[in-house]
Image (spheres, rainbow, N blue to C red):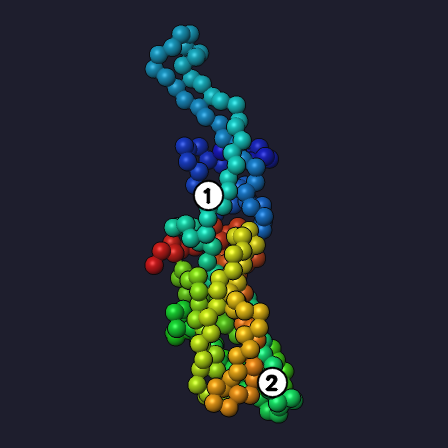
Amino acid sequence: WCNDKGECFANSPTLTINPSDIDKVFNKGVGFKPLTVTYSGEVDKGYPEATRTFESEPLPVALKYPPDGTKGICYEAQTVDHMQVAFSNIVSNPSGSRRYRLSFPTLAFDFLPGVTEITELASEPPVNFSPSTPKFQDKKLPETLVVNFSYDGNNPIPITLTKQPIPPSFGLVIYQTTDSNLALPYPEANPEITISHLQFQFTMAGSDQDRRKSMVNCQQFDR
């Protein structure tokens, strides 16, 4: 197995991408480099003897990303990059601040349970929770995600987010509400805000901006 630079890195029927081979196989943030494979072998009989061993010309191999969800391939997010709740205040220019809270019934961060909080001025939406949340525990992310939103001790309301179809080469996993404007009043008993949109943006596992590493430095996300 060789790349277009003439660097050869494996001598086996199948290709296993090791962390030490990452620069030979991937372009940072893009995907696979052009690769070739050369077949060779030996037979017990043949005349003349020089024909008993053989080697092919380098043959091009088009490697592609497996589809999302393939067992053992982790395109799962780990580090939270951006968490935003967009809303409008029903009463203009409210005073004071609010303690906003998001909880994730089906996910966990480095700590349990999956909860993040932030205090912001009531008059300054949207609320950005980044970078207050460190990392998710290594766990496969679901196609839909329920988030409980609340502030200042009011009863939480569940909001459903959907995982967006983003190619792995972008190195991101994004959840957001399907409606462009939820028009969801909160709190339910005495509304003070109208929630319009929620979006969470996560970088892949191995999230040091080198997207290639998400292919090799990861867990088997099958639990």
Neighbours of disc 1 within 10 Å: few (<14), some (14-19), many (20+): some
Q: In percent of the image, x 38 and y 54: which residue is there?
A: 220
- At label 2, the amino acid type is Asn
In the figure, residue 41 lies in which quadrant? top left
Q: Along the polypeptide, which appears first: circle 2 or circle 1? A: 1
Quarter of the rendering occupied by the C terminus: bottom left
Residue with the most extreme right position? 93
Q: Nearer the viewer, residue 195 or 166?
A: 195
Closer to viewer: mark 2 or mark 1: 2
Q: CA distance from mark 2 to mark 1?
A: 51 Å
- At label 1, the amino acid type is Ile
Q: Nearer the viewer, residue 67 or 4?
A: 67
Q: Decide if residue 222 is on the left or right side of residue 118.
A: left
Is the residue 12 above or below the residue 112 in the image?
Answer: above
Is the residue 159 above or below the residue 6 in the image?
Answer: below
Q: In percent of the image, x 62 and y 92: which residue is there?
A: 95
The residue singled out by tag 2 in the image is: 89
Neighbours of disc 2 within 10 Å: few (<14), some (14-19), many (20+): some
Question: Residue 221: image x %, image y %?
Answer: 39, 56
Label 2 close to label 1 by CB (< 8 Å): no
Is the residue 133 above or below the residue 73 in the image?
Answer: below
Question: Residue 134: image x %, image y %?
Answer: 49, 70
Residue 39 in view in this figure: yes
Residue with the most extreme top position? 48
Q: Could you tell me how many numbered marks the image carries? A: 2
Q: In percent of the image, x 44 and y 67: which residue is there?
A: 145
Q: Circle 2 sits in a helix, a strand or a loop, which is it?
A: strand
The residue singled out by tag 1 in the image is: 17
Q: Circle 1 sits in a helix, a strand or a loop, which is it?
A: loop
Q: Nearer the viewer, residue 25 or 170?
A: 170
Q: In percent of the image, x 60 and y 87: which residue is there?
A: 90
Question: Residue 184: image x %, image y %?
Answer: 52, 79
